[in-house]
């Protein structure tokens, strides 16, 4: 009896403890997993538009909608100008409102510190800061044009920003009793616009200094794994280990960018250390992409971009990961650059589109992402049959299953559109040919000029010959790795479309192993990660056993068992 009681007591303590725990990242296999309230967590998020958290009534109005849409997390800006309207006088009422409203609607919060920089600019600095440009200097272009970008080289800028930031994080620590705040983003899309680097006298003086030893040592120690861009820049000097920025990396705007990245990272590291002391949750920075062939200064130069990852990693080790904001075409291309065993993929901003659900499945399947978040989420469709709502509902159900398999490369993501329609995945002897479901021309929308909705999903290997296929708008056929991809176009009934001359090839299949579908069931994922049968899919729904598919209007989980046969 005594033993049972003490076991119950220990168990209760463990439960209380897991709830009292702040969010953290843990390494599982070759990835990092986010843990919230003691359980692995996938952020099914959305970021508010820039001005949507400046009025308590807007917060009250928007948050219930987010809950209806199935979000579990909201990304919310914290505005320095409204937090410290007069120097030294703080107003945390909006922060409190966000936390209490999020709790009411069962949402977690990721706060975005809109401090010294927001999309490069310093528009969120308080008026007292903006007006006192003598004390809080701005950057300059090479022509001496001052920009509304606070100087990263100014101790006054750092002290003012960091003071407000620390006070705010300390306040969160005081009020966030239920661990509602799960992460903090420091600044927003840092970087220099109009000019790749600052040409103020302070900046020029620093630029003439030798590259600091800490960075040089990092380059030497990590030479084999450096990003090719940085390695290439360094090679220009024959891998010199002592010298000024231009002596080490050559003279161009990409060297200007490396120099600025070093100083932005240094600044952010000090901010991160302040935050960590006050409230220990994961910290990250987000980057505007260097897409469309733009050069440093045409995009925010020196931001936490993939090609500068080494600089950010070396100089800002207190930042847990760097994150891409993906607005341009090429979602898969951008996402892939921000995932590594030590950089969890979190996409804090993605362009709001009905394709976000498909993109989310891709990110979780391909990169074991810790989360995704469309931007200006308050403008999204909250109807129960809206694509993102359906996707989030299913991803929420699938979370225990997905997180239980993280870290072992058991899953792949699929993301298709009209141009990018096919992906072949090999797993041992198995070849999975995955396509957009509209490559089967049976739905009128496939061929009538309609822009195809994205097809997106994931394939998770759960055991030998057993796979979970989930998402929307995808079709997957299974074959032996040695089988060719060539496929006759068959009608929906599986019959040839028209009569054709037959060319028998009796040798081709001798001893050849073939893969068949033993069964395909639509399933539901239970809270413990196991699955329960919903219905058997066969006949027309699997093209008489030739493939498994999910239509563009559905989001489903299929459990597929395969078997092998030959003659
Ligand atoms: C990226 C920024 O990070 C957001 O705050 C917002 O400005 C969007 N761009 C575009 O509206």
Image (cartoon, grey):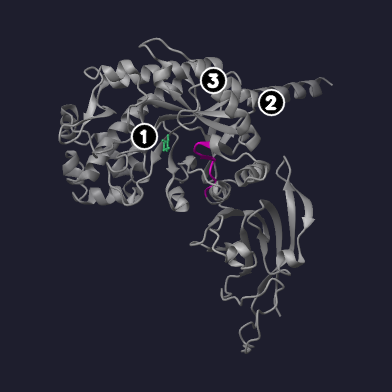
As drawn, is 489 to the left or to the right of 254?
right
Secondary element at image label 2: helix
329 shown above or below 565: above
Q: Residues within 10 Å of mark 1 (few under 14, many from 20)?
A: many
Determine the secondary structure under disc 3.
helix
Residue matched to label 1: 119
Residue 355 position within the rendered picture, expressed as x and y whole percent measured from the top left:
55, 49
Up-down relation of residue 112 to residue 294 (above or below): above
User: Mark 1 or mark 2: which is in front?
Assistant: 1
First of labels 2, 3 by sequence position: 2
- Left or right? Give the position of 157 relative to 457: left
Answer yes or no: is residue 431 visible. Answer: no
Residue 461 rendering spot, x and y as whole percentages = 63, 55
Residue positioned 45% across, 20% down in the render: 277
* Residue 111 horizontal/vertical position (percent): 49, 27
Above or below for 422 versus 367: below
Write the start and end of the magenta stretch as one range.
367-377
Q: CA distance from mark 2 to mark 3?
A: 34 Å
Q: Residues within 10 Å of mark 3 (few under 14, many from 20)?
A: some
Query: Marks 1 and 3: in contact by CB < 8 Å?
Result: no
Residue 56 is marked as 3
For the C terminus, give its image quadrant. bottom right
Q: Which of the 4 image quadrants contains residue 286?
A: top left
Q: Nearer the viewer, residue 349 or 251?
A: 349
Coordinates of residue 183 in the picture (x, y in percent): 51, 29
Q: Earlier in the sequence, mark 1 or mark 2?
A: 2
- The answer to which of 433 and 46 lies nearer the viewer is 46
Measuring 34% from the left and 51% from the top, which residue is drawn there? 292
Figure quadrant, ligand 1: top left
Q: Nearer the viewer, mark 3 or mark 1?
A: 3
| Residue ID for mark 2 | 15
Check residue 11 in the rendering and tell me which mark sits there, or answer none: none
């Amino acid at each position: 009896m005594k033993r049972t009681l003490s076991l119950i007591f220990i168990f209760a303590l463990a439960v209380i403890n897991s709830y009292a725990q702040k969010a953290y990242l843990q390494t599982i296999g070759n990835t990092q997993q986010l843990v919230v309230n003691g359980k692995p967590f996938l952020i099914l998020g959305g970021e508010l538009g820039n001005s949507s958290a400046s009025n308590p009534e807007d917060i009250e109005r928007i948050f219930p909608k987010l809950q209806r849409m199935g979000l579990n997390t909201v990304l919310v800006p914290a505005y320095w100008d409204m937090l410290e309207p007069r120097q030294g006088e703080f107003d945390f009422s909006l922060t409190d409102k966000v936390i209490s409203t999020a709790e009411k609607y069962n949402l977690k919060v990721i706060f975005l510190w809109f401090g010294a920089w927001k999309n490069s600019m310093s528009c969120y600095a308080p008026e007292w800061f903006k007006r006192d440009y003598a004390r809080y200097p701005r950057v300059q272009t090479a022509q001496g044009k001052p920009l509304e970008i606070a100087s990263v080289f100014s101790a006054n800028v750092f002290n003012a920003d960091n003071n407000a930031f620390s006070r705010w994080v300390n306040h969160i620590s005081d009020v966030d009793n239920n661990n509602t705040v799960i992460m903090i983003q420091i600044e927003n899309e840092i970087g220099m616009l109009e000019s790749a680097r600052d040409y103020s006298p302070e900046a020029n003086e620093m630029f003439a200094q030798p590259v600091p030893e800490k960075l040089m040592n990092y380059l030497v120690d990590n030479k084999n794994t450096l990003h090719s861009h940085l390695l290439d820049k360094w090679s220009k000097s024959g891998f010199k280990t002592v010298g000024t920025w231009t002596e080490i990396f050559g003279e161009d705007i990409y060297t200007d960018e490396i120099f600025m990245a070093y100083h932005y990272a240094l600044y952010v590291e000090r901010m991160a250390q302040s935050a960590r002391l006050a409230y220990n949750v994961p910290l990250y920075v987000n980057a505007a992409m260097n897409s469309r062939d733009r050069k440093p200064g045409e995009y925010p130069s020196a931001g936490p971009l993939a090609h500068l990852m080494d600089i950010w990693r070396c100089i800002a080790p207190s930042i847990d990961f760097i994150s891409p904001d993906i607005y341009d075409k090429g979602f898969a291309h951008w996402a892939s650059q921000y995932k590594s065993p030590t950089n969890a993929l979190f996409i804090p901003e993605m362009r709001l589109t009905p394709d976000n659900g498909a993109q989310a499945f891709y990110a979780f399947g391909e990169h074991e992402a810790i989360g995704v978040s469309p931007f200006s989420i308050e403008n999204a469709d909250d109807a129960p049959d809206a694509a993102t709502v359906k996707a989030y509902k299913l991803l929420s159900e699938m979370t225990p299953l997905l997180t239980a398999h993280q870290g072992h490369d058991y899953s792949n993501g699929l993301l298709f559109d009209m141009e990018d329609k096919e992906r072949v995945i090999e797993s041992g002897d198995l070849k999975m040919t995955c396509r957009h479901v509209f490559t089967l021309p049976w739905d009128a929308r496939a061929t009538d000029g309609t822009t195809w909705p994205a097809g997106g999903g994931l394939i998770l290997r759960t055991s030998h010959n057993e796979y979970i296929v989930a998402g929307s708008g995808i079709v997957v056929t299974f074959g032996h790795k040695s089988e060719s991809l060539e496929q006759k176009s068959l009608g929906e009934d599986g019959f040839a479309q028209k009569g054709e001359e037959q060319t028998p090839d009796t040798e081709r299949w001798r001893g050849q192993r073939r893969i068949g579908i033993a069964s395909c069931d639509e399933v539901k994922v239970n809270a413990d990660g196991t699955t329960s049968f919903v219905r058997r899919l066969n006949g027309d729904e699997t093209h008489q056993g030739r493939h498994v598919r999910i239509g563009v209007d559905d989001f489903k989980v299929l459990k597929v068992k395969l078997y092998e046969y030959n003659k």
